[in-house]
């Protein structure tokens, strides 16, 4: 079976533009969270979000803009960065053995909402003609494939918070088994619309804003955690078979060594430690690693009372005594929960942590929860950590779990 | 503004071309328009002139074809209100 390597990274989130910028901010514990601004003249009281408030770079012609919902634009921004770093030419002829595997949870939320505003508020009797193709879940994958000339398999995964972990993981399987030489994999989400945020709010899972320090509202693994903070992002990795990368003399950043997926099959929202453990164990098995090889876990760590406790439990189940040696951090404390883009963004950060030996912290973890008793790298990042393998966990509503393992390339 | 002037203005903005290159006989394809961008343009023109083109799907090759198509419905709308 082919080995799968990473030759490009891309990211955009409330932390900034570019994979390096995102990692610098995450490592420094600089939060991108603040009060939410909605695009329409409505307000959700006390709602914070990891919202991208800077101007997006102009990536497409004006004529194409109506084809791009914000989630597709975030996707293309991240994907084009990963493509650029990989050195694969955008102008090359159609690449049959190249594909795009993309994740999104909600899809074209803004496009859908705009249509409803037109129909129900403005009283119009028609909506913009490209609403379907801009809003459909596979829109980013299709745009990325077109722009890169990737004519192989192009798939979209939509499994809430694990969408882009499944996209990356299934791409790994696809390359491993020889169905493709290279796949641009990742995810994007732009869910911060009035309708979607209100729906989250109704579930009573969102963190309460800290009035004096809104940027510190997401506190995974802390005793005073109150829930998750929604975010928006795009993140991508260029995955290649080792033979393809070596053939074209590409710079190999790291190896995607393992992937595991599972479903709790127990409850729509209550997390289950056995289900989570199955995903982590499968990832270890496919990577051919022992538990003690893993030094760092980028946790799912959404900041919900039940979720963080369950993840602590599942990590202990899988790693046994070694769980106490692990460095575990939730970077959601600074970039929020970008749903379908979350796993890809966290995987990009995990790859950078592995490469640099710098572990980003769980920011603002000043009041530990006695029930969450592992090393969550509180407040301060750690440099000069000699790590050779790291795991990134993602768990979702609907019971889906996924774990990705990245190792130094040797 | 006449139908042509409005059409030319919207085309130039949307396709990022010099408005002087948009002439009645100019082929839409030569401006970089495709079926999707024409669909968007028609929608904007419907809103601009407050008309509804219904489900008719004519072949639109030149800028003048669009102008004729829009003018037909402007006339129909005027007749209806008269």
Image (spheres, rainbow, N blue to C red):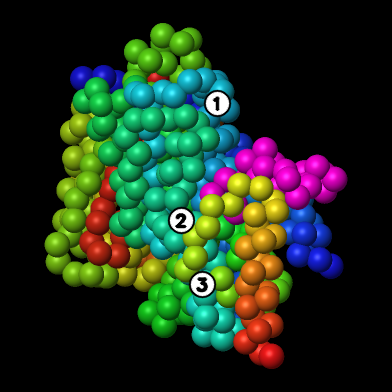
Cα–Cα gap, marks 3 and 2: 20 Å
The magenta stretch is B14-38
Q: Are marks 3 and 2 in contact (CB under 8 Å)?
A: no
State which mark lies toward you, 1 or 3: 3
Q: Name the chain letter of the residue that bears numbered label 3.
A: B
Q: Tell me residue A324's x, y (percent).
A: 32, 46
Name the one closer to the observer, A2 or A373.
A2
Note whether A154 is above or below B43 in the view shown.
above
Task: Pick the residue in front: A197 or A116.
Answer: A116
* Residue under pointer 2: A133
Magenta segment includes A82: no
Of residue A175 and residue A72, the one placed in the foreground of this image is A72
Q: Is A257 on the left-hand or right-hand side of A186? A: left
User: Which residue is disc 3 drawn over?
Assistant: B54
Mark 3 residue crowding within 10 angstroms, few (<14) / some (14–19) / many (20+): few
Check whether the beta carbons of the residues at disc 1 and disc 3 lie within 8 A of each other: no
Q: Quadrant of residue A395?
A: bottom left
- How many C-alpha atoms fall within 10 Å of the one at disc 1: few (<14), some, or many (≥20)? some
Residue ID at (23%, 42%): A260
Coordinates of residue A244 in the picture (x, y in percent): 38, 15
| Circle 1 residue | A90
Is B31 magenta? The answer is: yes
Residue at 44% from the left image edge and 71% from the top image edge: A227
**Mark 1 belongs to which subunit?**
A
Q: Residue at x 48, y 20 (%)?
A: A93
User: Which image quadrant: the N terminus of chain A?
Assistant: top left
Indicate the quadrant where residue A33 lies: bottom right
Observer able to see residue B79: yes
Q: Are marks 1 and 3 on the same chain?
A: no
């Amino acid at each position: 079976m082919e080995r799968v390597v990473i030759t490009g990274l891309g990211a955009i989130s409330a932390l900034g533009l570019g994979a390096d910028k995102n990692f610098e901010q995450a490592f420094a514990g600089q939060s991108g969270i603040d009060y939410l601004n909605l695009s329409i003249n409505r307000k959700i009281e006390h709602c914070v979000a990891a919202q991208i408030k800077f101007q997006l770079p102009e990536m497409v012609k004006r004529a194409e803009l109506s084809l791009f919902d914000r989630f597709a634009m975030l996707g293309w921004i991240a994907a084009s960065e990963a493509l650029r770093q990989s050195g694969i030419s955008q102008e090359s002829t159609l690449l049959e053995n190249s594909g795009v595997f993309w994740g999104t949870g909600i899809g074209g939320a803004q496009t859908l909402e705009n249509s409803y505003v037109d129909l129900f508020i403005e009283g119009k009797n028609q909506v913009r003609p490209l609403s379907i193709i801009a809003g459909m879940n596979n829109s980013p994958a299709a745009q990325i494939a077109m722009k890169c000339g990737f004519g192989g398999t192009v798939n979209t995964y939509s499994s809430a918070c694990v969408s882009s972990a499944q996209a990356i993981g299934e791409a790994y399987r696809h390359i491993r088994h020889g169905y493709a030489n290279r796949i641009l994999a990742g995810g994007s989400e732009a869910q911060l619309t009035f309708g979607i945020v209100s729906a989250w709010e109704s579930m009573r899972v969102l963190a309460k804003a800290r009035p004096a320090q809104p940027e510190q509202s997401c506190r995974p693994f802390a005793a005073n955690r109150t829930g998750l903070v929604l975010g928006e992002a795009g993140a991508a990795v260029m995955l290649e078979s080792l033979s393809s990368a070596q053939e074209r003399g590409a710079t190999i950043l790291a190896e995607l060594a393992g992937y595991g997926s599972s479903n709790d099959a127990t409850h729509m929202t209550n997390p289950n430690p056995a289900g989570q453990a199955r995903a982590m164990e499968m990832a270890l098995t496919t990577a051919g690693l022992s538990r003690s090889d893993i030094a760092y876990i980028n946790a799912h760590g959404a900041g919900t009372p039940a979720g963080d406790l369950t993840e602590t439990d599942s990590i202990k189940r899988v790693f046994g005594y070694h769980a106490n040696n692990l460095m575990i951090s939730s970077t959601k404390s600074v970039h929020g929960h970008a749903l379908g883009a979350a796993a890809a963004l966290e995987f990009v950060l995990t790859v950078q942590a592995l490469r640099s030996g710098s572990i980003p912290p769980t920011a603002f973890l000043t009041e530990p929860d006695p029930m969450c008793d592992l090393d969550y790298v509180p407040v301060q990042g750690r440099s000069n950590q000699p790590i050779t393998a790291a795991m990134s966990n993602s768990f979702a509503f609907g019971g889906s779990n996924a774990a990705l393992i990245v190792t130094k390339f040797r | 503004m006449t139908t042509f002037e409005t059409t030319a203005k919207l085309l130039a903005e949307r396709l990022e071309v010099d408005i002087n290159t948009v002439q009645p006989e100019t082929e839409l394809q030569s401006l970089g328009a495709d079926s999707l961008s024409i669909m968007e343009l028609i929608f904007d023109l419907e809103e601009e002139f407050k008309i509804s083109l219904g489900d008719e799907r004519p072949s639109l090759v030149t800028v003048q074809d669009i102008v004729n198509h829009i003018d037909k419905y402007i006339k129909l709308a005027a007749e209806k209100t008269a």
